[in-house]
């Protein structure tokens, strides 16, 4: 009887452990994007696992301003920072200013894609993000040299 109880406890622990690992893996971040647009111009950067691409366009002509690999360490740092955000409420973070509404600033937003969902912020002024987003934007700029 004691062996049966021990075996049951062990099996329960294994199943619970595997289920939680699957849930974590199932909702892993796959892409982080920063986009800023204004009338006639746009710029952005996309990070996917181990690579980034930065673009800029003026009056419709796309310019690739940066592209390359990133280390696993940098990807993990970005993912950790992004996971600290409440992704389900990303669209409820209030911007500190609204200059983008009258073309005095680029209108920017961040999109974070996981294996199960896509989460996007409200539009905020490029150069003046909400406090919650600053660490992520600063890390993106540090890694790529593009977001500024």
Image (spheres, rainbow, N blue to C red):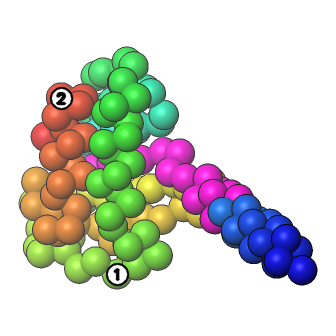
Residue 124, how many percent across, how many down? 22, 66
Q: Nearer the viewer, residue 57 or 97?
A: 97
Residue 110, how many percent across, how many down? 35, 57
Q: Nearer the viewer, residue 127 or 104?
A: 127
Q: Secondary structure at mark 1?
A: helix
First-in-chain label (1 vs 2): 1
The vertical placement of 15 against 52, above or below, is below
What residue sits right under mark 2 in the picture?
A: 145
Name of the residue lying farthest toward the front: 2
User: Is residue 35 a member of the stretch shown in magenta?
Assistant: yes
Rendering quarter of residue 62: top left
User: Is residue 112 a member of the stretch shown in magenta?
Assistant: no
The mark found on residue 92 in the picture is: 1
Residue bounds of the magenta highlight:
18-36
Rendering quarter of residue 64: top left
Residue in view at x 31 percent, y 33 percent = 74
Residue in view at x 43 percent, y 69 percent = 87
Rendering quarter of residue 127: bottom left
The vertical placement of 63 against 125, above or below, is above
Q: Nearer the viewer, residue 63 or 8?
A: 8
């Amino acid at each position: 009887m004691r062996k049966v109880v021990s075996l049951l406890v062990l099996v329960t622990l294994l199943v619970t452990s595997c289920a939680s690992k699957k849930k974590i893996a199932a909702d892993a971040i796959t892409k982080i994007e920063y986009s800023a647009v204004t009338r006639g111009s746009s710029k952005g950067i996309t990070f996917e696992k181990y690579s980034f691409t930065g673009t800029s366009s003026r009056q419709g002509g796309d310019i690739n301003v940066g592209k390359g690999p990133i280390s696993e360490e940098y990807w993990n740092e970005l993912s950790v920072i992004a996971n600290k955000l409440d992704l389900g409420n990303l669209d409820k973070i209030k911007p500190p200013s609204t200059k983008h509404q009258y073309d005095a600033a680029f209108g920017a937003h961040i999109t974070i894609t996981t294996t199960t969902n896509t989460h996007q912020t409200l539009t905020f002024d490029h150069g003046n993000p909400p406090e919650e987003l600053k660490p992520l934007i600063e890390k993106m700029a540090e890694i790529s040299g593009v977001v500024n």
